[in-house]
Image: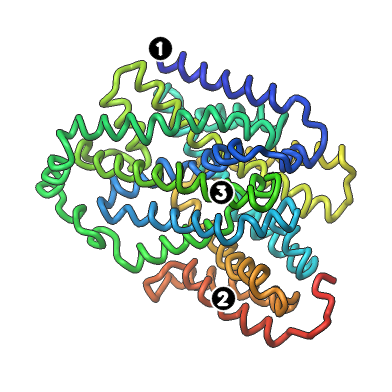
């Protein structure tokens, strides 16, 4: 009963905070980017909350539970990507004064490229939506085991929609303060202590694994180096595009605050959080053997090693960890759909755009329920669906910001086509070279970007025509 009560209290808290914060949202820009007026420290906590989702929490723990020390590759790759996103792209994105990735592309290389990127971006960000929605259901099941996964997913999706449809990014940034507090308390303080105490210290964890599964203590043994490098590069480089926080970067007061808030959130909260979550999964592999699914290691440890009330609070923290990202990427997908697809077909005024964004939120979330339910793994959902977009966007972003003079519509469109064909074609062939389809596509698209844009470059051409 205590678990149910605390779950209800958490849900009620975010609904009240989100609804009160967002009840006065009247424009499409307020919904999408909080009117480009997010305070610095609010953005630090909000960016941290948005980054810390299923991949950061359940995904990192799952990797280290399943593969031991080799599983830390996920935390390392994602951390590098977040730092690069903060230092290289955040300030420049804010300077562009846009709201979506396709808007940025359209501004520099024209509508055809932007339309292609819109489709890829929507699929890529939607993969994150599906993974977060699945995670919300997985965690709620730990509160109420009698619920089926599908029922749990639907309940949490409805909760997320209630406050985000009303308040958009304004509501999301306000609820993130509650979410980040619960996350830090749970994953960076309480759970590591619980894991160490129950295991009898780090030395006992190592000794247990040395006896039961020594391969988990050897880096590169349970996961091949090629897999670790390519998958780590995927999450690192795709993290540079920063879909979870794109709207928050665009909503910062200026470029300096966008860069500073992103980097501060990464170093102060996000990176340590990834490592702590990974460590908990590593310790869990010594404490709990033969868990049905590695995605459930954190909830399983909470259930098995904490009391009823504390366990319920910690489970609420896991819900909080996923809720912030789920809300962020659902909002972003709906904004791209409404502005970069529907709005391009039929121009919409301010009020109509706001209504369309809210309707798209509901549609995106409903589709996320379907894909999330049938997806087999949190990490695989994110990597498999998002790979073609990441392979296209990373070199294009670098080109737009650091090779702007030579970037042009034909060269960029060629880069997009090569990224998609190479990534999917290599995947259909069974990844014969031993590297991931994303990494293969990224190599091909990067080479193509330089070659094609050089070939098609014409001095003085109106590139955004």
Q: Is residue 316 left or right of residue 389?
A: left
Image coordinates of residue 335 in percent, x first then y, are 73, 46
> How far is mark 3 from mark 2, CA to CA?
26 Å
Image coordinates of residue 144 in percent, x first then y, are 42, 21
Image coordinates of residue 164 in percent, x first then y, are 67, 32
Q: Is residue 275 left or right of residue 178?
A: left
Nearer to the camera, 44 or 353 = 44
19, above or below 286, in the image: above
Which quadrant of the figure contains the C terminus?
bottom right
> How far is mark 1 from mark 3, CA to CA?
39 Å
Nearer to the camera, 40 or 196 = 40
Q: Residues within 10 Å of mark 2 (few under 14, many from 20)?
A: many
State whether residue 269 appears in this view: yes
Image coordinates of residue 256 in percent, x first then y, are 64, 52
> How far is mark 2 from mark 1, CA to CA?
55 Å
Residue named by callout 2: 446
């Amino acid at each position: 009963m205590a678990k149910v009560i605390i779950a209800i209290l958490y849900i009620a808290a975010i609904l009240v905070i989100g609804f009160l914060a967002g009840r006065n949202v009247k424009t499409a820009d307020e919904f999408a980017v909080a009117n480009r007026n997010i305070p610095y420290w609010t953005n630090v906590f909000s960016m941290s909350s948005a980054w810390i989702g299923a991949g950061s929490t359940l995904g990192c723990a799952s990797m280290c539970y399943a593969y031991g020390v080799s599983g830390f590759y996920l935390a390392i790759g994602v951390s590098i990507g977040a730092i690069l996103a903060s230092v290289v792209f955040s300030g420049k994105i804010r300077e562009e004064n846009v709201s979506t990735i396709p808007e940025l592309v359209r501004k520099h290389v024209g509508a055809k490229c932007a339309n292609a990127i819109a489709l890829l971006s929507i699929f890529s960000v939607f993969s994150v939506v599906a993974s977060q929605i699945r995670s919300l259901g997985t965690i709620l099941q730990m509160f109420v085991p009698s619920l089926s996964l599908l029922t749990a997913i639907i309940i949490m999706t409805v909760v997320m929609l209630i406050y985000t449809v009303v308040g958009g990014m304004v509501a999301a940034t306000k609820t993130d303060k509650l979410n980040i507090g619960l996350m830090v308390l749970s994953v960076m303080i309480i759970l590591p202590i619980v894991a160490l105490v129950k295991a009898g210290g780090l030395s006992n964890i190592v000794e247990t694994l040395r006896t039961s599964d020594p391969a988990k203590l050897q880096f590169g043994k349970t996961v091949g180096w090629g897999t670790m490098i390519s998958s780590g590069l995927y999450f690192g480089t795709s993290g540079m595009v920063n879909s979870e926080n794109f709207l928050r970067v665009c909503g910062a007061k200026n470029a300096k605050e966008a860069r500073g808030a992103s980097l501060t959130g990464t170093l102060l909260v996000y990176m340590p959080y990834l490592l702590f979550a990974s460590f908990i999964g590593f310790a869990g592999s010594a404490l709990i053997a033969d868990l049905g699914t590695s995605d459930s290691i954190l909830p399983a440890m909470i259930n098995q090693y904490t009391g009823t009330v504390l366990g319920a609070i910690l489970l609420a923290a896991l819900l909080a960890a996923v809720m912030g990202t789920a809300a962020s990427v659902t909002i972003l997908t709906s904004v791209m759909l409404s502005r970069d697809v529907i709005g391009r077909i039929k121009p919409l005024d301010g009020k109509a755009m706001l209504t369309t964004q809210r309707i798209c939120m509901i549609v995106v979330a409903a589709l996320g329920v379907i894909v999330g339910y049938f997806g087999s793994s949190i990490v695989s959902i994110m990597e498999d669906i998002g790979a073609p977009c990441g392979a296209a966007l990373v070199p294009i972003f670098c080109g737009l910001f650091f090779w702007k003079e030579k970037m042009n519509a034909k060269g960029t469109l060629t880069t997009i086509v090569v990224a998609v064909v190479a990534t999917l074609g290599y995947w259909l062939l069974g990844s014969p070279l031993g590297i991931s389809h994303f990494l293969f596509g990224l190599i091909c698209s990067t080479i193509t970007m330089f070659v094609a844009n050089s070939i098609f470059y014409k001095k003085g051409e109106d590139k955004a025509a």
